Image (cartoon, rainbow, N blue to C red):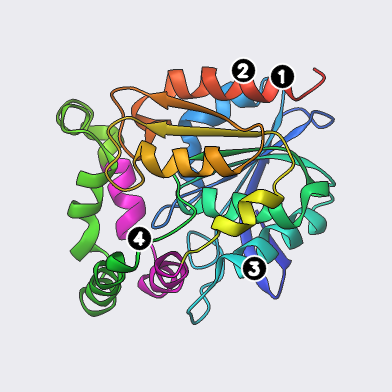
Amino acid sequence: MKIEANGISIGYDLDGPANAPVITMSHSLAANRDMWWLQTGALQQNYRVLRYDTRGHGETSVTQGPYSIALLVDDIVALLDAIGIGKTHFVGLSMGGMIGQLLAANHPGKLHSVTLCATACLMAPEMAPVWDERIKSAKDNGMVAISETTIERWFTQPYLTSNKAEVERITHMIETTSATGFAGCGQAIKTLDQLEDLARISVPTFILVGADDPSTPPAASEVINKHVKDSKMEVIENSSHLLNVEQSRLFNETLLAFVDGQTNI
């Protein structure tokens, strides 16, 4: 489905019982709402599951960048308003978790809870040239040019070796992402600094991270956990960046245990 919100067309799916509490899922950079295919079935037993494509990704409009995390927060707030969702649980992974942090800080009335997966609140200045090179490579040579190195960061080697179909599905998402959209969001991540915003988060907060994640390692999650009052954190073993895919069953069980605890179901 698509709907106009915040001046763009946003692609989304809304599945599950009509009157159930809502869980909103926000994907990583260079993916789309299909990234949550292993979560939807488990979550929609007791929840309405809203999956949407971030600006510049999937079926959502591609606009000229650079974008900002604040702009991406405005997009999801406008989407929730447009489809009549007053309050939701929010689950964001990587870039989605960056959106979740600022959403929770600025719009607590929209949220029952926020779950921040494989994410960070601050991008080190020394990473700027790395992001510049990724963005230049994608713009000059297409997303195919960065898909292999991205996949190597997103999964552990044992998973890459033994789960070809899942890896191919994610690779397809990367390679079909708009280079312009990737660049717009990449600029937002490159300049990320939300450390001071964390103190304003008052909604129940859960932090999940893969033990073997080189992109947003457990240390990055520990910073968020330290600065968000009463937050809870768990590390999932034998998992890299896309822990929702690599350890999907444990991810689903762990997520539901938290969300159920914040919901009257």
Q: Gap in Å between the C-alphas at discs 2 and 4?
A: 34 Å
Judging by the rendered image, the residue that carries numbered circle 3 is 9
Q: Is residue 201 visible?
A: yes
The residue labelled by disc 4 is 176
Residue, disc 2: 257
Q: In which quarter of the image is residue 140?
A: bottom left
Q: Distance between the residues labelled 3 and 1?
A: 34 Å
- In the image, what residue type sits under mark 2? Ala
> Which one is earlier in the sequence, the residue at label 3 or at label 4?
3
The secondary structure type at the circle numbered 3 is strand
Residue with the mark numbered 1: 261
Amino acid marked by disc 1: Gly
* Rendering coords of residue 80 (x, y %): 76, 53
- Please tell me which of labels 1 and 4 falls first in the chain: 4
Residue 139 falls in image quadrant: bottom left
Expressed as whole percent of the image width and height from the top left, the position of residue 177 reads 38, 62
Q: Which of marks 2 and 4 is nearer the N terminus?
A: 4
- Report the front residue among 246 and 204: 204
